[in-house]
Amino acid sequence: MLDTIRALGAQPGVSGRESAVREYLIAQIRGYADSWETDPLGNLIVFKKGAAPAKNKVLLDAHMDEVGLIITSIDGDGFLRFAPVGGIDPRVLFGRTVCVGAQGTVGAIGVKPVHLLKEDEEGIVPPMEQLYIDIGASGREEAAALVRPGDVAWFRSEVTAFGDGMLMGKALDDRVGCAILLQMIRSELPYDCRFSFSVQEEIGLRGAQAAAFSVAPDYAIVVETTTAADISGVQDEKRVCVCGDGAVVSFMDRSTLYDRALFDRAFEVAKAQGIPCQTKSMVAGGNNAGAIHKSRGGVRTLAISVPCRYLHSPSCVMKQSDIDAVARLTAAMAAELAGC
């Protein structure tokens, strides 16, 4: 699993540019999946036969895309101006290194140095439009030979194991979900299942909306990551969820009020199988469930997430035991819903 997460995290996959992630997944499912297709948006939809036909059609979803930047212009000095693709806090960008465009040109994100700040600028986080990417070009012409407006940039950060069973790196949201679904496809399943590796989640749950319409499932399980604020200075319910306390099953977020029976059943199954499980203590965020549960005539949907610190940054942090808990609970609930 760790090797798979590292390989998936290394792929560039800013929203709308997920092809490298998709091609890696296709290479890994060959010989294991019974069929797959890529739809016009770029979703990879996979069918895997189980030991028995499913009584209900279950769709398991994880998104391939990651947050990033899109180049909007090149100034006369060869610096790249950009806009965010997905929700990125400007505070995580200063001094970070990125790869840009088809050639993966390396650059550093710059901002006006502190000694040049005016008094009213001190202590204020500069807005995104004041930042730029320095690719070492001498001017616009040299930069334009490497990068064009419309190219995307992604964080230059590999997945690293550290501390007490922790992982750190870019795009763990949601390459970890992709790794969990890939593991299921490469294993023996009790019932037939459908899988969607979806695109463009970070910019509005777009791929999942199309995938769910095509598959028309009875049930869906969204395998995700969610914000953990178990950090210094944060107490009680503001911690949202805790790294090391297991899989997160949500009751509500900003895009979905989850099926209460599925929410309760997930905790019952987790308890019966000894899987660590927790819920979010705040109504915040959202994921592909927001699109899937409204598809066609409605889909009963559950979200199972890995708690993740510093989401949408070059250094997402999570605990490997939580990934295992999410994988176990996802497999158990998929079998439960397919065979009920």
Image: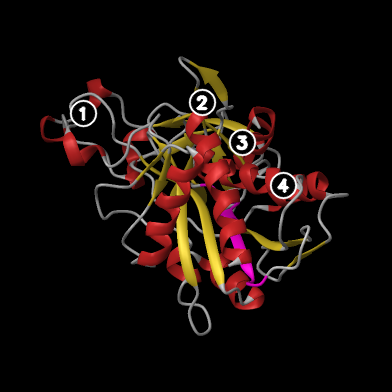
In terms of sequence position, does the residue under pointer 4 or pointer 2 come before the other? 4
Q: Mark 4 packing: few (<14 Cα in 10 Å), some, or many (20+)? A: some
Question: Given the image, on which type of amino acid does mark 3 rest?
Answer: Gly
Q: Tell which of 148 and 217 is nearer to you.
A: 217
Instruction: Quarter of the image for the C terminus: give it.
Output: bottom right
* Eye-nearest disc, 2 or 1: 2
Question: Residue placed at 18% from the left, 26% from the top?
Answer: 233
Tell which tag, 1 or 3, sits nearer the viewer: 3
Query: Is 61 contained in the magenta span?
Result: yes
Q: Which mark is nearer the camera, 3 or 4?
A: 3
- What's the amino acid at mark 1? Leu
Picture mark count = 4
Q: Where's the N terminus, which quadrant?
A: top right
Instruction: Inspect this view and state whether residue 244 appears.
Output: yes
> Looking at this rendering, what residue extends furthest in the right direction?
31
User: Residue 145 location, x and y as percent?
Assistant: 68, 42
Instruction: Return the residue at label 3.
Output: 9
Label drawn at residue 20: 4
In 3D space, how far apart are the residues under numbered discs 4 and 2 (Cα atoms)? 22 Å
Dot 3 or dot 2, earlier in sequence: 3
The reply to whether the C-beta atoms of the residues labelled 3 and 2 are less than 8 Å apart is no
**Identity of the amino acid at label 4?**
Ala
> Whole-percent x and y of residue 335?
62, 57
Choose the circle earlier in sequence order: 1 or 4: 4
Observer-side mark, 3 or 2, equals 2
Write down the region rendered in magenta.
Answer: 55-66
Q: Where on the picture, by quarter, is residue 105? A: top right
Q: Which residue is mark 2?
A: 167
Disc 3/disc 2 C-alpha distance (Å): 11 Å
Helix, strand, or loop for circle 2? strand
